[in-house]
Image (cartoon, rainbow, N blue to C red):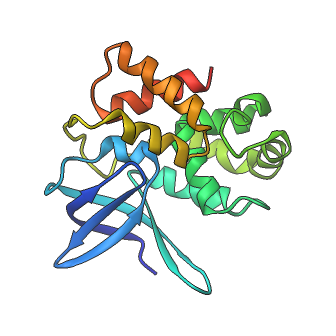
């Protein structure tokens, strides 16, 4: 199994990055939290990798920190939480806040993430409460450097939010508001829009 990859960023988008490792391009799905930390295309990056094997596919999920990787693997261990939903959770709520919400039993906060209803939020609290407490306090260094922010279309931000499960109209409204507030880069627009959407 692949546990970590180090290479140059070939292409990056809010949901995935193509990492060139000595001439081999690995397509790696990433949460928004990792996307924010990635440098620009052509720059070096190191990702913690969770390899998920299915009957019809082998998928790589990449994370900026070991903490996020552990959280991802804990999330998918919960009944009815698959990799796509786990990535949406990590994209919609910071790792520290996620740990705190689970530890404190804050079902209402967890339920604000698209795809997580009240029942799933309750299941996350029930099954993970004891497991995330050590992660909440752990200091885990970032595996990738903070990159420069390029100017990308608001359409990309809307597409990223829709891919996370938000309704198109809600995503467009939040992105429009974020852009009006002066946010220019894709990363900044998505971050502000997520804050707006989570109330």
Side of 179 relative to 57 (left or right): left
Report which quarter residue 76 is drawn in.
Answer: bottom right
Image location of residue 115, percent across then percent down: 70, 46
**Visible residue check, residue 140:** no
Image location of residue 62, percent across then percent down: 42, 61
Position of the C terminus by quadrant: top right
- Residue at the limit of the structure toward the left, as seen here: 42
Image location of residue 176, percent across then percent down: 43, 22
- Residue at the limit of the structure toward the front, as seen here: 169
Report which quarter residue 47 is drawn in.
Answer: bottom left
Q: Is residue 19 above or below residue 33?
A: below
Q: Is residue 64 above or below residue 147?
A: below
In percent of the image, x 77 and y 29: which residue is there?
A: 108
In percent of the image, x 43 and y 53: which residue is there?
A: 15
In percent of the image, x 20 and y 37: which residue is there?
A: 150
**Visible residue check, residue 35:** yes
Side of 65 relative to 58 (left or right): left
Number of numbered tags placed on the structure image:
0
Q: Nearer the viewer, residue 11 or 1?
A: 11
- Residue at the limit of the structure toward the top, as seen here: 181
Side of 39 relative to 53 (left or right): left
């Amino acid at each position: 199994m692949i546990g970590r990859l180090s290479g140059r960023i070939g292409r990056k988008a809010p949901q995935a990055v193509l990492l060139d490792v000595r001439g081999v391009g690995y397509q790696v799905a990433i949460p928004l939290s990792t996307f924010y930390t990635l440098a620009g295309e052509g720059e070096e990056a190191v990702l913690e990798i969770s390899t998920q094997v299915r009957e019809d596919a082998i998928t790589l999920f990449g994370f900026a920190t070991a903490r996020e990787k552990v959280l991802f693997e804990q999330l998918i261990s919960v009944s009815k939480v698959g990799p796509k939903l786990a990535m949406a959770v990590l994209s919609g709520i910071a790792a520290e806040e996620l740990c705190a919400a689970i530890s404190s039993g804050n079902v209402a906060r967890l339920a604000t993430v698209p795809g997580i209803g009240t029942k799933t939020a309750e299941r996350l609290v029930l099954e993970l409460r004891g497991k995330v407490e050590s992660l909440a306090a752990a200091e885990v260094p970032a595996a990738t450097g903070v990159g420069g922010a390029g100017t990308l279309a608001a359409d990309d931000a809307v597409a990223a939010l829709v891919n996370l499960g938000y309704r198109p109209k809600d995503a467009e409204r939040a992105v429009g508001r974020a852009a009006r507030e002066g946010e220019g880069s894709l990363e900044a627009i998505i971050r502000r829009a997520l804050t707006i959407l989570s109330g």
